Image (cartoon, rainbow, N blue to C red):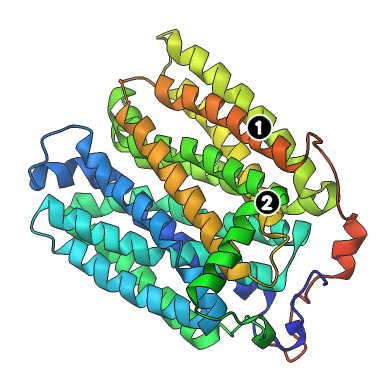
Amino acid sequence: MTGAHPQDDAFPMGQAEFVGLMAAMQALMSLSIDVMLPALGHISNDLGVSGANERQLVVGVFMTCAGIGSLFPGALADRFGRRRVVLFATAGNFIATFVCAISPSFPVLLLARGIAGLLTSAMMVMPMTILRDRYEGDAMARTQSLIATTFMVVPMIAPMVGQAIMLVAGWRWIFGVTCAMGVVVFIWAGLRLPETLLPENKQEIRPLVIVGNMRLALTERSAIGYFLGAAFVQAGLFGYLNSAQQLVGETLGAGTLFPVLFGLMALVMAGANFINARIVVAFGARRVSHCALFVFIVMGAIHALVAMSGKEGLWAFVVLMTISMCMLSFIAANFQAISLQPFARIAGAAASVMSFVRMVLSSLIGAAIGLSFDGTALPIAGSMAVLGVMALAMVLYSERGKLFRRINPPEYYRQNQPPKTPPHGG
């Protein structure tokens, strides 16, 4: 097995377009969350939501359903192909998001958001699966970091776009942005995305086959610690997203600056992803992500102490949280690549079950963190420190107590990577 897909010589996309399309898929998930943040208060007021924290359900329900839905696309993609699943999911997301825009009540909105989450889950699973079809190991981590660098443009600008729409129109028009993004992904994938599933890797749609493949993914020791570890650190991010508007926008007094600060934090995260793409092949996904995890734990503990002092201001929060978010950039892509490494033949099923566990676990924990909001950053920061320690325990289990190992030397990935431009110039 090389670091590239066996059919790379005929692949119709150059690397830049491939990275752009995968980023657009992942961005559809991110946009569905981030563009909503400035409008949560308006949505709750217009639809008669009484509880201050209930507004978080617009985000929490979507993320939880996305986690549940992620259990299915991989198995379907292992049988029918990646391309068909992408097109079906983007079309369904458009319809569900349009229903959100015309929802007459909060329960109807939450129902439509849940359905949108179920369908949009494919945008989380399919890029992972397609990447595993074409890359492995540190090369996959590098490409995922390039994708993350690109799609981080969305969380940079999404809250500002949401805020701008709120200045000239109602919150319902915000859902139009997500609809438009879905149309872009549908057309782009329909015209340019080839099928990356090899015919010999097709799996049967039989419960025993699907369950067996998923069981294999869940019981592989070298993988389980990494996708559970990713779930724990991601839960800290989701906890922040759930309560960001209340904490940063209201309690810490950012006001209309909230979307700008949110975008700046995303910009720094994009820079961290770019750095990871430049260094991961040289140093290895394990070494980079293990170092980042230790920093993540330390920063969470420091931030918790600052929050407990009662003297935390807006800019102290922004600096401390941005450092933690940067560490997530070094952790996420590398953990994903390491956990999918053993599953070239069943990449879809493995990506689905890992995404399911990661999203459901992180969404539920993140929702609990958000609902525990007490007017300070302590629930978020303290949870990040604890969750980081839990992630470290999981990694130690997968690595049998040995951190900072290097599996393949840099030369392996230099010799086994797909060409940046296909020979026929596509």
Q: Which mark is residue 166?
A: none
Q: Position of residue 394 (x, y in %)?
A: 65, 37
Q: Is residue 412 left or right of residue 182?
A: right
Q: Secondary structure at mark 1?
A: helix
Q: Quadrant of the N terminus?
A: bottom right
Residue found at the very far top of the displayed protein: 309
- Nearest the camera: 183 or 396? 396
Q: Position of residue 63 (x, y in %)?
A: 37, 51
Mark 2 nearby-residue class (10 Å; few <14, some 14–19, many ≥20): many
Q: Is residue 81 visible?
A: no
* Quadrant of residue 287 within the rendered picture: top right
- Nearest the camera: 212 or 177? 212
Q: Is residue 414 left or right of residue 353?
A: right
> Mark 2: which amino acid?
Ala
Which residue lies at the image location 74% right of the left edge and 85% below the top edge?
Answer: 7
Does 24 appear above or below 223? below
- Nearest the camera: 33 or 122? 122
Which residue lies at the image location 77% right of the left edge and 81% below the top edge?
Answer: 6
* Quadrant of residue 140 within the rendered picture: bottom right
Does 15 appear above or below 358? below
Q: Is residue 372 visible?
A: yes
> Mark 1: which amino acid?
Ala
Q: Which residue is mark 2?
A: 223
Q: Which mark is residue 393?
A: 1
Disc nearer the start of the sequence (1/2): 2
* Quadrant of residue 346 within the rendered picture: bottom right
Is the C-beta separation of discs 1 and 2 under 8 Å?
no
Q: Secondary structure at mark 2?
A: helix
Which residue lies at the image location 74% right of the left edge and 92% below the top edge?
Answer: 424
